[in-house]
Amino acid sequence: MPESKTPEFEQALAELEALVARLERGDLPLDEALKTFERGVELTRNCQDSLKAAQQRVEILLKRNGRAEPEPFSIPESQDGTPPS
């Protein structure tokens, strides 16, 4: 399988978090802050695309199993009505 130019979701998210931390410090020169922001926008788009693709895959898998809609997740309750610990 050929290597993708877009970073894996986890790598992109980690890099995005680091960029946000750098920008929040507020000590970057304007030009560097703009370049950092642009990279952050690019990483955000990559993450959104990855999440959209994952959602589509889940929907396809659910349709294959005869379910058109995802089911809400529910936590089983104990006998006294509280969630298990």
Image: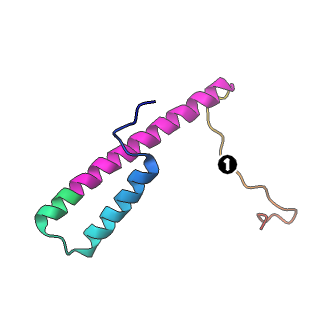
Q: Residues within 10 Å of mark 1 (few under 14, many from 20)?
A: few
Q: Is residue 68 visible?
A: no
- The one of 83 and 6 positioned closer to us in this rendering: 6
Residue at point 45% right, 38% down?
A: 52
Q: Is residue 83 above or below residue 73?
A: below
Left or right: where 17 falls relative to 35: right
22 vs 84, left or right, is: left
46 horizontally vs 63: left or right: left
Q: Nearer the viewer, residue 72 or 25?
A: 25
For the point 46% across and 30% down, the residue is 1
State the SS at label 1: loop
Residue type, numbered disc 1: Phe
Residue 81 part of the magenta segment: no
Q: Is residue 7 above or below residue 35?
A: above
Question: What kind of secondary structure does the magenta stretch mostly adopt?
Answer: helix
**For the magenta stretch, what is the residue range?**
37-66
Q: Is residue 63 above or below residue 12?
A: above
Residue, disc 1: 73
